[in-house]
Image (spheres, rainbow, N blue to C red):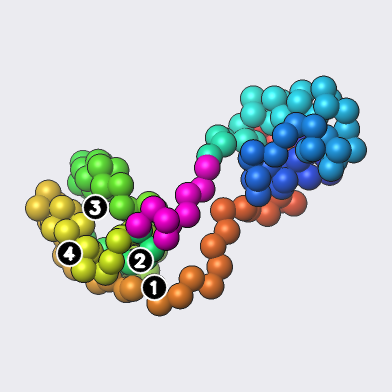
Amino acid sequence: MLDDRDRRILDTLQRDAGISVTDLAERVALSVSACSRRIQRLEESGHIARRIVVLNRERMGVPTTVFALVKTAHHSDEWTESFRRVIADIPEIVEAHRLTGNHDYILKIVLPRVEHYDVIYKQIVRKLELFDVSASISMEELKNGMAIPVGYAAGHG
């Protein structure tokens, strides 16, 4: 089971995975060795999926975000697997979700400029038949958080 200290460790690490174990231990009022053991346990239990570095999109040359809403007439497992493979090979597509409602999928695409969207669009439609794709350009990012709430975790594996 997770306790409040585990949740504080998780919350702190997801906001700054580069924090030293010494600083983290001090923040959560644990010895360095106890904090290190807890981190290892949280990794082994799957609460910590991985540690990553978040890059600055402006500096990396991909400041533009486009959301593409995809409709397809195909819903077979084979088509879905083909779609997964196609979008996995396009690094500009940073998120993809299967949806309920009027659209089948939404893709979050990061680009150097909006005109580059056509390049990505063509990469997809050359390999797959789609019923409809409509794109919306993000005018302003109001919130971008990788951190998720930690209070819901009951500690079950």
Place residue 114 in its image quadrant: bottom left
Q: Which residue is mark 2?
A: 64
What whole-number distance in Å separates the C-alpha atoms at marks 4 and 3? Answer: 25 Å
Q: Residue furthest front?
A: 59
Nearer-N-terminus badge (1/2): 2
Residue type at mark 2: give it. Answer: Thr
What whole-number distance in Å separates the C-alpha atoms at marks 4 and 1? Answer: 16 Å
Identify the mark at residue 33; answer none if there is no mark. Answer: none
Residue range corresponding to the magenta coloring? 53-61
Question: Is residue 145 shown to the viewer in this render?
Answer: yes
Q: Residue at x 80, y 32 (%)?
A: 22
- On the image, the x and y values in percent for residue 69 come to 30, 66
Q: Secondary structure at mark 3?
A: loop
- On the image, the x and y values in percent for residue 125 come to 13, 56
What whole-number distance in Å separates the C-alpha atoms at marks 3 and 1? Answer: 28 Å
Q: Which residue is mark 4?
A: 118
- Answer whether residue 157 is magenta in the image: no
Question: Is residue 68 shown to the viewer in this render?
Answer: no
Nearer-N-terminus badge (4/3): 3
Q: Of the residues tagged 4 and 2, which is closer to the observer?
A: 2
